[in-house]
Amino acid sequence: MSPRTKEQNDVIREQRFQQIRSAAADVYLAMGTAFEIRDVALRAGVGYGTVYHYYNNKFTLLADLLWGAFETSRELTRAKLSGVPSWSVLERFSSSLLKQWEREPATFILYKMASEKFHQLPASVIGELPQRFENELFVPVAEAFAGVADSGMAEESANVLIGSLVGCAGLWLYHNHPALDAERTSRLLLAGIKQTATAREEQQPC
């Protein structure tokens, strides 16, 4: 049998990274940051030493997981919030975000940790991720709200939307509830925010 080429080794290495990160997301949802490397190895079906070869502790593993999730989430945000802001655009973005969280739990974990200000991770490990999340994932949502309602409540509306989505998805992912209706959930949340925004605008002096 001929030795593997560099390209083949690179493919295997990337597959192993994905296998470990996927297992880490599942273990985090089950255990929070109380998990250990051995728990990830067991979930991934690989040896402890294999995981440790790639990540020397659980915090570097979580950081890598979150950075990958950030890149995926940034692509979705750019794709769904480009163009002219509207309530329909925000509704479709919210629905797409929930569906992404179902497909890739690591992206849900990113938003959940961001809502908790990443306090579970050492600053030395997480680096500039909190600021990047703010600038590239949160601000575009606030800007979209500013385009459809009173700009003075854009940040508040973005916080309400993202916080509500995290809460709904958390019940769904943590407690094995039946599949969440992403479209209906997004429609209800945006309808409530829109109603509040409209009422506030009507109360403003002419």
Image (spheres, rainbow, N blue to C red):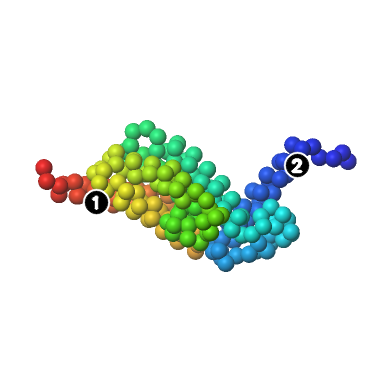
Direction left: furthest residue: 206
Q: Is residue 86 visible?
A: yes
- Assign a secondary structure to mark 2: helix
Q: Residue 43, how many percent across, how many down? A: 66, 60
Quadrant assignment, res 26 = bottom right
Marks 2, 1: nearer the viewer: 2
Q: Residue 6, how many percent across, how many down? A: 77, 38
**Mark number, residue 177:** none
- Assign a secondary structure to mark 1: helix
Residue depicted at 34% across the width and 44% down the height: 142
Residue 92 higher or lower than 119, as above or below: above
Q: Total label count?
A: 2
Q: Is residue 12 left or right of residue 4?
A: left
Q: Residue 78, how many percent across, how many down? A: 44, 37
Q: Amino acid at mark 2?
A: Asn
* Near-viewer residue (187 or 46): 46
Q: Quadrant of the C terminus?
A: top left
Direction front: furthest residue: 124
Q: Is residue 154 left or right of residue 42?
A: left
* Near-viewer residue (185 or 117): 117
The residue that mark 1 highlights is 196
Q: Looking at the image, do the residues carrying marks 2 and 1 touch, with CB atoms under 8 Å apart?
A: no
Of pointers 2 and 1, the one earlier in the residue sequence: 2
Q: Is residue 183 left or right of residue 75?
A: left
Quadrant assignment, res 80 = top left
Q: Residue 157, how many percent across, how many down? A: 31, 50
Residue depicted at 34% across the width and 49% down the height: 158
The residue that mark 2 highlights is 9
Q: Is residue 43 visible?
A: no
Residue 117 higher or lower than 81, as above or below: below
